[in-house]
Image (tube, rainbow, N blue to C red):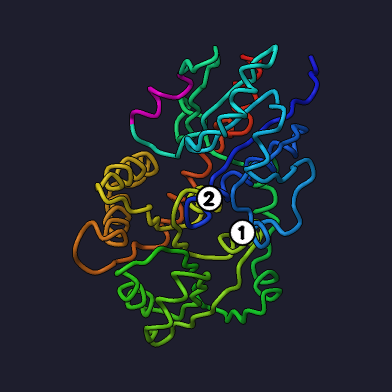
Amino acid sequence: MHRAPRLWDLFCRVIDNHGDLGVCWRLAADLASRGEPVRLWVDDASALDWMAPGGASGVELRAWDEAADATPAEVVVEAFGCDPPPAFVARMAARPRAPVWLNLEYLSAEPYVERSHGLASPQPGGLTKWFFYPGFSVRTGGLLREPGLEARRERFDRGAWLRTQGISWQPGQRVVSLFCYDNTAVPGLLGALADRPTLLLATPGHAQRQLRAMAPGPGVQVVELPWLSQTDYDRLLWSADLNFVRGEDSLVRAIWAGVPFVWQIYPQHDGAHGPKLEAFLDAHFAGAEPALADAVRHATRAWNGLVAGPLALPARGPWARAAAAARDRLALQPDLCTQLIRFVDGRG
């Protein structure tokens, strides 16, 4: 039975590196494309000038401070425990029918995610907050994946896209993208890439700054990219034979690209990123050849500074097959936006 669209309030605080905003914008645009209008409340939307220059139909961008005087929507999503303004929460409690209130948590493959996904937390004023965890198994909220994404990837022409970016790609050149935080393993990466002609596409920020202080090895051509929209960042990942990604949003997009990648997890002072990284590697390479899984695990640990020694890149053939298999396996699960809507349907 068809139901009327609901208005969603999505709250986002930009902490650093634009990752939170990247996830929230993709979610807002995905919801809106499915007929669910969204008000995105954000404290610093400046990065959307390059991340989503065309905006998205059905997404209304609102300043965080204006929320205190707004009438809450039927669904309220706070991203990563950012807590809506207290005055807004008071208005939620005053509604004749309380909104469905969700805390969209950070992505992890750790065991607690399955235990915590969908749990309710009573709040003052008779409200209930539900914890919604993205994840990699059927007992989690899944991953962001827009309808038609795989079909767009299959139609993609990397040579044509590279030309539109003014990038000269020579036959036989390996294409590698680099998106990273500060990383002491970057010199080792340049050495590892010197084994064959390589086009290294560096994103703005940490990657370009570090590379400017180094001399690439013979055969490694470095190209500095401009800030890319989320759509073009997807195309960058599709263009590459190997992707180095960081944080949450680019990890998920690298998974959907289905080509080999190495993930730099956000480092935490208490070391919590180490077990989180290991849990992801366990989940992602569960069905891979043991030798390949071990090689990728060691390369990922080295890239994250968790083991000593040189950065050794695994053989591309088995790695590419494992990446495509992991993508296809995850694509069988309902995507995050579909699961969010179903979850709200069950409580609205």
Up-down: is 26 above or below 135? below
The residue that mark 2 highlights is 14
Instruction: Count neighbours of disc 1 (C-alpha within 10 A) and say few if under 14, some if 14 to 19, many if 20 or more.
Output: some
Up-down: is 133 above or below 28? above
* Amino acid type, label 1: Ala
**Over which residues does the magenta segment extend?**
111-119
Instruction: Count neighbours of disc 2 (C-alpha within 10 A) and say few if under 14, some if 14 to 19, many if 20 or more.
Output: some
Up-down: is 310 above or below 284? below
| Residue 127, x across and y down, in percent | 55, 16
Residue 116 within the magenta-colored segment of the rendering: yes
Q: CA distance from mark 2 to mark 1?
A: 10 Å
| Residue 205, x across and y down, in percent | 49, 70
The residue nearer to you, when weighing 154 against 300, is: 300
| Residue 343, x across and y down, in percent | 59, 21
Q: Residue at x 45, y 58 (%)?
A: 245
- Asked if marks 2 and 1 touch (Cβ < 8 Å), the reply is yes
Q: Residue at x 37, y 66 (%)?
A: 182
Quadrant housing residue 11: top right
The residue that mark 1 highlights is 47
Q: Secondary structure at mark 1?
A: loop
Quarter containing the C terminus: top right
101 left or right of 196?
right
Q: Residue at x 51, y 22 (%)?
A: 130
Q: Residue at x 44, y 76 (%)?
A: 209
